[in-house]
Image: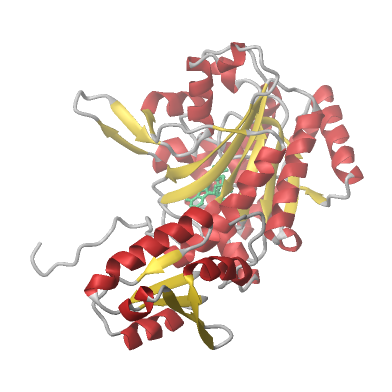
């Protein structure tokens, strides 16, 4: 190890306070909006048994074939770091019999890291964060609509609504897709020699994924290919038509994309993505759809379901690309300085008293052994709003020196007046002293 730098694993990231300011700003809005639609938070394990993903996501999907972080534990059981949240959530609700409880609200959300062994690039990492939401037990268009309304509201509140577009499609039932796959494969086999390596492999594993290939040559071949929309059963078609009309009636613009499919096997009927043209090729910030057979496939009762997931890093990149929100909040409200070691206690005592009265203020005591001049300079550098200087002589007389860094004023106040003044400084209401 000597002389060798210690580094992280490729494709995983450290996030520091400046970055997290933006993350927290976004996460607070996500939380607020989800709560306003009565979604309930759940926290689920990051580790699951590998078999549940193989069964539910599909053995021949990209995720299971090449992207999973799987390893053996000490007893030789195969464990996987979750690549997505839906499967774990369904496992949890079946295991804990949540759907058997007589509640009418089965809407859940979670936020946390996911892991996929992919080639790292902008917007694509090996550890990334997702906000996922899942709704169980509803099988009418209303809930699909509500999810579109909810996500639309998120973009508005975050301020990215003008930079995202909704794409939507129906992929019908499993039987529809089975029929269609046969036709698609027999059409594409004629062009197998000119397909790229990925598509060649998918021809035998997951042919539907060829539809959303980014390769222009492949897209050219697909122009004459049979269309999935022509294989979709009547009731799925009506459902989709109704949903599109409902979305339009709320003034939400969408693009019908007949080639939109999902990377995981468990979806049916409605699928959608919110995309942005500000993100390069990793342009999907939110993806979702119905998965009406997954709960039963995983051993639960027959339960319809729909969900979506937002890639937080991509959302952060999008916000950064259009907004200059470097100063979301003031860093420090009150910066306390003492000049001598025996004044330290007065500083701590004062800070505790201020926090008792004003619990939302951010109060910082400089504990370094520096000169008062240096401490004041530091307070200015980090844009503290006011500085309180504790000086034994003045404290004895019960006075504190206050420096208003914004207005460049300074004055002495006794403690009671200081407490009142703080209320003015930070425009705090509903506090009686
Ligand atoms: P992609 O086509 O970009 O690989 P996907 O179909 O694999 O996406 P989903 O499984 O639907 O993605 O995940 C939902 C969202 O999570 C994506 O739309 C994206 O915003 C985010 N996401 C997926 N994989 C990654 C990753 N490796 N790094 C960062 N974000 C990701
Ligand atoms: Mg992927």
Res 330 seen here: no
Residue at 40% from the left image edge and 67% from the top image edge? 364
Residue 188, horizontal then vertical, whole percent: 62, 42
Q: Is residue 182 above or below residue 130?
A: above
Closer to the camera in the image, 280 or 160: 160
Q: Is residue 63 above or below residue 98?
A: below
Res 184 seen here: yes
Quadrant location of residue 161? bottom right
Question: How does the figure colour the protein chain or chains?
Answer: secondary structure
Q: Is residue 70 above or below residue 200?
A: above
In this rendering, the count of numbered labels is 0
Closer to the camera in the image, 364 or 306: 364
Please state if 190 lies on the left or on the right of 76 as rendered.
Answer: right
Residue 164, horizontal then vertical, whole percent: 71, 58
Q: Quadrant of the C terminus?
A: bottom right
Closer to the camera in the image, 278 or 216: 278
Please state if 379 lies on the left or on the right of 338 as rendered.
Answer: right
Closer to the camera in the image, 93 or 227: 93
Please state if 301 lies on the left or on the right of 350 as rendered.
Answer: right
Q: Quadrant of the N terminus?
A: bottom left
Residue at 40% from the left image edge and 64% from the top image edge? 350
Residue 6, horizontal then vertical, whole percent: 20, 62
Residue at 48% from the left image edge and 28% from the top image edge? 88
The residue positioned farthest toward the left in the image shown: 2
The residue positioned farthest toward the front in the image shown: 397
Residue 130, horizontal then vertical, whole percent: 52, 45
């Amino acid at each position: 190890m000597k002389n060798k730098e210690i580094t992280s694993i490729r494709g995983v990231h450290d996030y520091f306070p400046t970055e997290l300011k933006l993350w927290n700003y976004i996460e607070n809005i996500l939380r607020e909006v989800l709560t306003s639609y009565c979604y309930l938070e759940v926290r689920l394990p990051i580790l699951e048994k590998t078999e549940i993903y193989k069964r539910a996501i599909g053995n021949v999907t990209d995720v299971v074939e090449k992207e999973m972080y799987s390893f053996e534990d000490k007893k030789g059981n195969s464990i996987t770091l979750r690549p997505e949240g839906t499967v774990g959530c369904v496992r949890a609700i079946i295991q804990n019999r949540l759907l058997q409880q007589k509640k009418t609200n089965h809407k859940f959300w979670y936020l946390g890291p996911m892991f996929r062994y992919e080639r790292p690039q902008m917007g694509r990492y090996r550890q990334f964060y997702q906000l996922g939401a899942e709704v169980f037990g509803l099988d009418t268009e209303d809930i699909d609509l509500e999810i579109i309304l909810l996500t639309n509201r998120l973009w508005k509140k975050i301020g990215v609504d003008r930079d995202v577009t909704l794409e939507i499609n129906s992929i019908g039932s499993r039987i529809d897709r089975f029929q269609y796959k046969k036709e698609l494969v027999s059409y594409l086999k004629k062009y197998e020699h000119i397909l790229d390596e990925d598509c060649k492999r998918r021809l035998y594993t997951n042919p539907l994924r060829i539809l959303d290939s980014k390769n222009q040559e492949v897209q050219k071949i697909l122009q004459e290919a049979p269309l999935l929309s022509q294989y979709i059963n009547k009731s799925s078609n009506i459902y989709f038509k109704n949903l599109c009309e409902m979305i339009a009636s709320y003034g939400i613009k969408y693009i019908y994309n007949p080639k939109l499919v999902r990377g995981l096997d468990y979806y049916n009927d409605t699928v959608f993505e919110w995309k942005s043209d500000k993100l390069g090729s990793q342009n999907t910030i939110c993806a979702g759809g119905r998965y009406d057979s997954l709960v039963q496939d995983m051993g639960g009762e027959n339960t319809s379901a729909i969900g979506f997931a937002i890639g937080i890093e991509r959302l952060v990149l999008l916000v950064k690309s259009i907004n200059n929100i470097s100063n979301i909040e003031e860093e420090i409200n009150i910066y306390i300085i003492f000049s001598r070691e025996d004044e330290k206690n007065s500083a701590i005592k004062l800070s505790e008293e201020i926090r008792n009265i004003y619990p939302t203020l951010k109060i910082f005591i400089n504990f370094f052994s520096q000169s008062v001049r240096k401490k004041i300079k530091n307070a200015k550098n980090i844009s503290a709003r006011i500085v309180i200087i504790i000086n034994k002589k003045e404290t004895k007389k019960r006075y504190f020196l206050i420096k208003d860094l914004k207005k460049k004023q300074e004055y002495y106040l006794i403690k009671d007046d200081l407490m009142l003044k703080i209320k003015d400084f930070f425009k705090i209401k509903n506090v009686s002293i």
